[in-house]
Image (cartoon, rainbow, N blue to C red):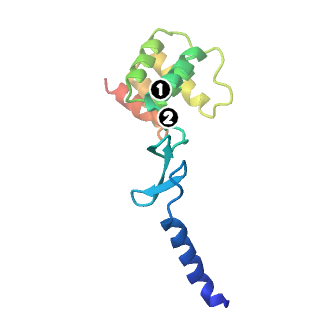
Amino acid sequence: MNAQNWPSLCFALSVLLVALPWSAQGGAVLRDGGAPQFREQGILSAQAGMARPPDDEAVLAQEFRGAVDDGSNAALIRFIARHPETALADEAWRRLQQRPAPDEHPLANDPDAAVYAAFDTARRTGTAEAWRDFARTYATHPLAAEATRLASQ
């Protein structure tokens, strides 16, 4: 066989393998445009054995619990920065308002620890000017939008 026939042979073999359904006794069957589906106990189920996608609300709730359990202002601020439009961000704000003192220890190994500390300082100061200063200083950070919103209240 010469080298010119290899592409044709490879294509023919791939078409043949795709076109042949596997055994219906627990093997894959190609359906819906070629997506493999599997038979389990006589029932066809899509992608049997694959993990379900994560539940976004459960993941968000777990992240919020982690921020609360951390016990720091910075962890709550980080949660707000990551999820500003969620109901749990409102709860994080409520918890922050109950914390008038600054953190004793910033978040360890967090590259944004200084940003969270500055945001917390602006929060505790509570003036429009403090929020504007934060928004100017950290203009590229997601918390800048939150500070701008708070400055205009």
**Amino acid carrying mark 1 in the image:** Ala
Left or right, 88 with reference to 70:
left
| Residue placed most toward the observer, 71 or 62 | 62
Placement of the N terminus among the 4 image quadrants: bottom right
In the image, residue 89 lies at what x, y percent? 42, 23
In the image, residue 127 lies at what x, y percent? 40, 19
Is residue 97 among what the camera can see? Answer: yes
**Residue labelled with disc 2:** 54
| Residue placed most toward the observer, 68 or 7 | 7
Left or right, 124 with reference to 8:
left
**Residue labelled with disc 1:** 58
Q: Which residue is farthest left?
A: 153
Q: Residue at x 43, y 26 (%)?
A: 131
Residues tagged 2 and 1 counted as in contact (Cβ below 8 A): yes
**Does residue 46 lie above or below 105 as drawn?**
below
Q: Residue at x 68, y 30 (%)?
A: 109
**Does residue 143 lie above or below 5 as drawn?**
above
In the image, residue 79 lies at what x, y percent? 50, 26
